[in-house]
Image (cartoon, rainbow, N blue to C red):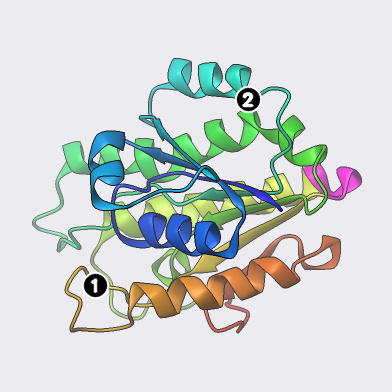
Amino acid sequence: MATILITGCDRGLGEEFALQYAAKGDHVIATCLSPAGFSARHRLGPNVDVVGLDVTDEGAVLQLAADLQDREIDILINNAGIPGPHLSLADTDLHLWRRMLEVNLIAPFVVSKAFIENVARSEQKVIAFISSRMGSISLNNTGISYAYRSSKAGLNMVMKSFAIDLAPRQICVLGIHPGNVPFAADAGLAASASVNRMREIIAEAGPHQTGTFYNYNGQILPW
């Protein structure tokens, strides 16, 4: 039974990651802004710990790391993030931009750094960053969305540097684009299908894959 730590489980992909790993029988540590809301929606077994965490609160992240200092974490999934809106040049909101950088870029760095030792002691040794193809400079053919694109491009660089720095410890660090997963259940790629494919990528990952930027279907994406 692996131990999986997932950030941003209040809804969407994070919630689905938690449910799928829990159903598999793994021990899940699901962090949420509103743990009571998550627990109220789901009947949880003893293999799921729901923990309140604001990933932008460095003190809270470090306290959780201290609480879990003796726990091996096989897979750390940095999922918490702000997905939009995707504003035009004229409508770009600097306040939102700064908030996106804090949540989408700086927080995953803080969380990953805090739990390096937990991951290093585990058997699987995987840190996954849920990124976006909108963070790819090569694939930007439509412009706009300055805040979101820059936060995910920066996240990709953080992921790549972690991969290089942690390679001697045999930790595999990945970036994964989840596909177009809208909040509406009847449009785009279903969260359940996206998470299932991303879990396959994570399960097959090892030191030779570290530093790779994947599409949810296993395709390698350009930077």
Q: Position of residue 33 (x, y in %)?
A: 29, 35
Q: Residue furthest left?
A: 91
Our reading of the magenta stretch's main secondary structure is helix
Q: Residue 128 falls in which quadrant of the image?
A: bottom right
Q: In the drawing, what numbered circle is on residue 68?
A: 2
Between disc 2 and disc 1, the foreground one is 2
Q: Residue at x 23, y 67 (%)?
A: 144
Q: Which residue is mark 1?
A: 182
Label 2 element class: loop
| Residue range of the region highlighted in magenta in the rendering | 166-170
Q: Quadrant of the C terminus?
A: bottom right
* Mark 2 or 1, nearer chain start: 2
Queried whether the magenta region covers residue 124, the answer comes back as no
Q: Decide: few, some or many residues near mark 1? Use Cα within 10 Å; few <14, some 14-19, many ≥20.
A: some
Q: Position of residue 118 (x, y in %)?
A: 73, 33
Q: Is residue 223 visible?
A: no
Q: Position of residue 199 (x, y in %)?
A: 58, 69
Q: Residue at x 49, y 64 (%)?
A: 20
Q: Amino acid at mark 1?
A: Pro
* Mark 2–mark 1 distance (CA, rounded to whole Å): 33 Å
Count how many numbered circles sit on residues in the image.
2
Q: Position of residue 50 (x, y in %)?
A: 42, 37
Labels 2 & 1 near each other (Cβ < 8 A): no
